[in-house]
Image: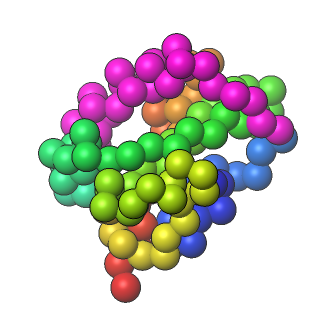
Amino acid sequence: MLNQCSRSTPQAPDGYWEPTERDVQALEIRLPAYLRARPEVSATRVLERLSQYRRQYAGFLRGGRKSIYVNLFLSEYGEQWRSDVVLVCDGGIGFWGVEFDTDIQYLVHVAYNGVA
């Protein structure tokens, strides 16, 4: 999940961990406010359709800190996402990701796919 085709993702992790439901809820609670505070038009556009995005979560460790990377994509992708990591080149704001630092409870490093 941390090796996407047309968007940046967090640097290589030191290891992985499995986020709890509480960790994911903390991320999800903060996501709308984070997007509202972003200056780019893409953030406004994804916020308008936030409930339509499906999600995949990956917990990773870097420098002794826990983070969660969430891979977001529009529901039109189908059902394959339940068993496979969604990896799509291009697609614009239909595919994007953001990192959540669980130690400071803050979202960082949002990135959207490119457009062909």
Q: Is residue 32 magenta?
A: yes
Residue 75 in the image: x percent, y percent?
32, 54
Residue appearing at x 59%, y 34% in the figure: 68
Above/below status of 81 relative to 18:
below
Query: Which residue sits furthest left?
Result: 48
Query: Which residue sits furthest bottom?
Result: 116
* Location of residue 61 by image quarter: top right
Could you tell me if residue 96 is visible in this image?
no
Q: Which of 12 and 24 lies nearest the eye of the viewer?
A: 24
Q: Which residues are magenta?
A: 15-40
Query: Which residue sits furthest right?
Result: 14
Lateral position of residue 110 relative to residue 58, left or right: left
Could you tell me if residue 91 is visible in this image?
yes
Above/below status of 73 relative to 34:
below
Q: Quadrant of the N terminus?
A: bottom right
Q: Is residue 18 magenta?
A: yes
